[in-house]
Amino acid sequence: MPASPTKTATPTTRQSDIAVEVNALKKNYGDLAAVKGISLSVAPGETFGFLGPNGAGKSTTIKMLCTLVIPSGGTAHVAGFDVVKDRTEVRRRIGLVFQDTTLDDYLTAEENLRFHADLYGVPRQQVRSRLEQVMEMVGLWERRKNEVKTFSGGMKRRLEIARGLLHAPRVLFLDEPTVGLDPQTRSHIWNYIHELRKQEDITIFLTTHYMDEAENCDRIAIIDNGTIVALDTPEALKGSIGKDRIEIQTDNNKDAISVLKDHFGLDSSESEGSVAFHVPGGEQFVPRLFAELSIPIKSVRVARPTLDDVFMNYTGRTIRDAEASTTERMATNPWMRARSRR
């Protein structure tokens, strides 16, 4: 059975200092409960991450916090303003980078940002200096006169981050900021995000399904099926498991799972052709495993706890398995198919 959710985790701040505050927030699409009464708070200056598979409720939550979707229940405040009652005030104080690009490919980088400055009412005398500041921050100042259609995917993402910062928001929301990018470009994007934290007085709230990306956050909320199952710092979440992960490959993984349960009292699961389970002192356990497991072992791997292990510990499955089950549900549920197109 998965462990109970970790209880922690809210930094000590005054009520008025909370950048994002969520209480029992819900969103239903017909009979589908996309977000099921989540609660959390984020401190100013914090980088807070939502980690979970596609379809877990991450983007729906972001849309509610950014006033793009009206909640079905509960409350949420961003920069001190209610996301339903004070939508205009919230929008003035947030920046948002969507999963899919929303840049105009036929405008230059500078023209895209100037259009955004007009929408947000940035004082005309400040536009030039602010534009240079944010574009320098993401390494695109020298390309400001180029049309966006000539940019790579990573450059477009950096430009969108610059655009989200242009009006000096209190909270920057990044919805899957590196999805679809190669590992090297993803690493560069995170270098820029770390740099902007040094230069800007800003809170970052991001969603991701990449485990390594979540390690960059001060705290993580693991979300699955619309529910937060654990919330803490990455190190505390990994430490909460207290066990090593062992993966074995055998000629009969189904029988191996049964023997691990009956002989060793271990719960295990199969994913991507391997049987995985957790034990304290993994290296010391391996010799016993070879000696006592009645099914021949083809390979064995021992690893210290990772965030993927944390996800499996709290949900009973890996994040890839969770995404696969979400894909299956979408194929049979018209509400989920419609939501994925929004």
Image (cartoon, helix red, strand yellow):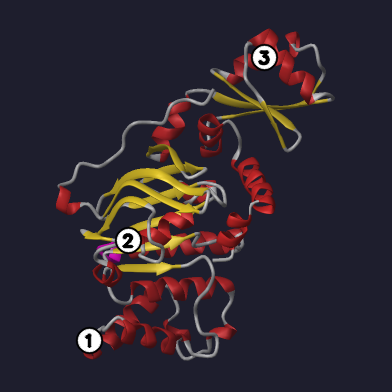
- Which amino acid, by three-letter code, is at mark 1? Pro
Q: Position of residue 309 (x, y in %)?
A: 55, 33
Q: Please name the residue that numbered disc 2 is placed on.
A: 197
Image: 170 above or below 42? below
In this view, the residue in front, 245 or 65, is 65
Q: Residues within 10 Å of mark 1 (few under 14, many from 20)?
A: few
Image mark for residue 123: 1
**Which marked residue is nearer to the observer: mark 1 or mark 2?**
1
- Which amino acid, by three-letter code, is at mark 2? Arg
**Which marked residue is nearer to the observer: mark 3 or mark 2?**
3
Residue depicted at 61% across the width and 38% down the height:
318
Q: Secondary structure at mark 1?
A: loop
- Which amino acid, by three-letter code, is at mark 3? Lys
Q: Position of residue 101 (x, y in %)?
A: 52, 73
Q: Quadrant of residue 119?
A: bottom left
**Disc 1 or 2, which lies upstream in sequence?**
1
Q: Secondary structure at mark 2?
A: helix
Q: Please name the residue that numbered disc 3 is placed on.
A: 261
**Disc 3 or 1, which lies upstream in sequence?**
1
Specify start and end residues of the magenta stretch as a single range: 197-202
The residues bearing labels 1 and 2 have C-alpha atoms spaced at a distance of 23 Å
